[in-house]
Amino acid sequence: MSEDIKDLTVQEAEIVPEEPITLNPIDLEKATEWEDFISLWTISQEIDMRNQWFKGDIANRVVTVHGESSLSKFADDVHEKRVTLENYRRVSRAFPREMRDFNLSWTHFFVASYTDSYNKGESKFESEERFKWIKKACDESWSTTRLAQEIKKEHALVADNQDIFTYYEEYLGKVGHVLLHMEKEHLTKEQAKKLLDKLMAVYSDFTVYLDEVK
């Protein structure tokens, strides 16, 4: 392992409390300059990202304190699917706190985590390829799509393909829910046709894209 990657894979570190980030409605009421709105949006994005990491940390802590079997009950009590908690949990296990400071989205880390297999029996990942990929994504300013493409190109996707399928299946389910609950009464016939044409175009592109699956 190269030294620059090795430096990034420290497994244990003292937990340093993060500075709290808050959004105050008063700040929005006072905002007038363009940069004010940019700043508020950036803060909201940071809060979103911290929440995703924290959900994973919560799930890990639940299992640590109450055992592996407790996660299903916890998922029921917080009205989430277990697979959703497992996804959050996986990413938090894959990347310790000192590895979460890259200027990348949580989804980057989620994608990269599937370049390593997780050994449930030994409670650890069997390799450290994910660190290399997340560093590449940061250095090259890759989007999540580009990262996934590069991983696929190198045949580096080695872990838990079923989990990835479940993630995207669930995501498509959410998209379907949004589409079937839009305020269609506020659309004109022409607008409805444009939306349908757009959806069919995405479907066509998606079909071509999936034709590459071996």
Image (tube, grey):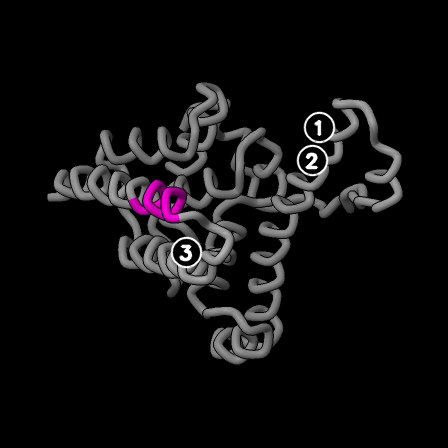
Question: Which class describes the residues within 10 Å of circle 3: few (<14), some (14-19), or many (20+)?
Answer: few
In this image, 6 relative to 22: left or right?
left
Q: Earlier in the sequence, mark 3 or mark 1?
A: 1
Image depth: mark 2 or mark 3 in front: 3
Question: Which class describes the residues within 10 Å of circle 1: few (<14), some (14-19), or many (20+)?
Answer: few
In this image, 49 relative to 94: left or right?
right
Say if the magenta span includes residue 151. Answer: no
Q: Hey, what amino acid is under mark 2?
A: Trp
Pick the residue in front: 179 or 164.
Answer: 179
Pick the residue in front: 180 or 75.
Answer: 180
* Secondary structure mostly seen in the magenta stretch: helix
Q: Are marks 3 and 1 in contact (CB under 8 Å)?
A: no
Say if the magenta span includes residue 194. Answer: yes
Give the residue at x 47% y 22%.
141
Pick the residue in front: 17 or 149.
Answer: 149
Q: Are marks 2 and 1 in contact (CB under 8 Å)?
A: yes
Q: Secondary structure at mark 3?
A: helix
Single out the residue that lies furthest toward the top: 140
Residue indicated by mark 1: 38
Against 59, residue 116 (above or below) is above
The image position of residue 149, as x and y in percent, is 29, 32
The segment highlighted magenta reads 189-196
Residue indicated by mark 3: 179
Alpha carbons under labels 2 and 3: distance apart: 25 Å
Is residue 207 among the parts visible in the rendering?
A: yes
Residue indicated by mark 2: 41
In this image, 147 relative to 16: left or right?
left
Q: Hey, what amino acid is under mark 3?
A: Leu
Is residue 119 among the parts visible in the rendering?
A: no
The image position of residue 206, as x and y in percent, is 23, 42
Alpha carbons under labels 3 and 1: distance apart: 29 Å
